[in-house]
């Protein structure tokens, strides 16, 4: 594929503006998604952080849920950050709701509890050392299926993973100036 990738950013709630800005900095062509027609011809999709329950409800109300689920099932490259990771997960330990249930991971919502609800740390992500990781009432991954590759761990807990063309991170790469995690996803989408 040549030229800039058109990357949809689910823009119904949460941290979509930060993803749009990061995509522009990375040389991609972001498109905010608020309705099904905006899904046409996207090369990849980002599900931002925010509040997964609200995002799931709004996507259903806007007629986005079914087409996005079908596109993810059809192999559209997708990157879920924080709430977006919860939307992708097959299992949510502490929530009866399921959303796309596409990625073979179990997550714990608000996994860090109240005291450590939000924090910044640094760690390895895939081949990249010393990535700044911003956690905001973040989930973490408590179990992963055999086809899932864990890409980042903090204090022994998996916080980023990949399965096929699906990428998930518990932290917010779009809130730091470092574009390496996004570039990892864009490379995945081009492959
Ligand atoms: N706690 C949120 C949820 O459960 C996720 C937080 C975030 O995306 N920053 O949906």
Image: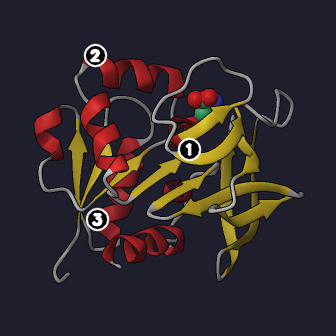
Residue at 23% from the left image edge and 44% from the top image edge: 32
Q: Are marks 2 and 3 in contact (CB under 8 Å)?
A: no
Q: Nearer the viewer, residue 134 or 83?
A: 83
Q: Which mark is residue 178?
A: none
Q: Quadrant of ligand 1?
A: top right
Mark 3 is surrounded, within 10 Å at the Cα level, by few (under 14), some (14 to 19) or many (20 or more) other residues, namely: few
Q: Position of residue 174 (x, y in %)?
A: 48, 56
Mark 1 is surrounded, within 10 Å at the Cα level, by few (under 14), some (14 to 19) or many (20 or more) other residues, namely: many
Q: Nearer the viewer, residue 46 or 148?
A: 148
On the image, numbered disc 3 is attached to which residue? 24
Mark 2 is surrounded, within 10 Å at the Cα level, by few (under 14), some (14 to 19) or many (20 or more) other residues, namely: few
| Quadrant including the C terminus | bottom left
Q: Nearer the viewer, residue 91 or 13?
A: 91
On the image, numbered disc 1 is attached to which residue? 85
| Labels 1, 3: front one | 1
Distance from the alpha carbon under mark 2 to that under mark 3 = 29 Å
On the image, numbered disc 2 is attached to which residue? 61
SS state under label 2: helix
SS state under label 1: helix
SS state under label 3: helix
**What is the residue that sits farthest to the front in this orientation?**
146
Q: Is residue 114 above or below residue 161?
A: above
Residue at 31% from the left image edge and 37% from the top image edge: 11
Q: Is residue 141 above or below residue 176?
A: above
Residue at 71% from the left image edge and 54% from the top image edge: 159
């Amino acid at each position: 594929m040549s030229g800039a990738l058109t990357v949809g950013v689910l823009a119904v709630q949460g941290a979509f503006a930060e993803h749009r800005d990061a995509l522009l900095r990375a040389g991609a062509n972001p498109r905010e998604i608020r309705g099904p027609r905006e899904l046409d011809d996207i090369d990849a999709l980002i599900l931002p952080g925010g509040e997964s329950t609200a995002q799931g409800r709004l996507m259903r109300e806007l007629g986005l849920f079914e087409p996005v689920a079908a596109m993810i099932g059809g192999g559209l490259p997708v990157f879920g950050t924080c709430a977006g990771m919860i939307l992708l997960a097959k299992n949510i330990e502490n929530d009866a709701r399921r959303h796309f249930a596409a990625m073979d991971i179990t997550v714990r919502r608000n996994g860090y509890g109240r005291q450590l609800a939000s924090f910044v740390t640094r760690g390895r992500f895939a081949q990249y050392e010393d990535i700044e990781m911003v956690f905001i009432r973040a989930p973490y991954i408590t179990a992963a299926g055999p086809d899932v590759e864990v890409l980042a761990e903090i204090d022994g807990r998996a916080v980023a993973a990949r399965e096929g063309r699906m990428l998930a991170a518990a932290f917010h790469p779009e809130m730091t100036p470092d574009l390496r995690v996004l570039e990892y996803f864009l490379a995945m989408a081009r492959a």
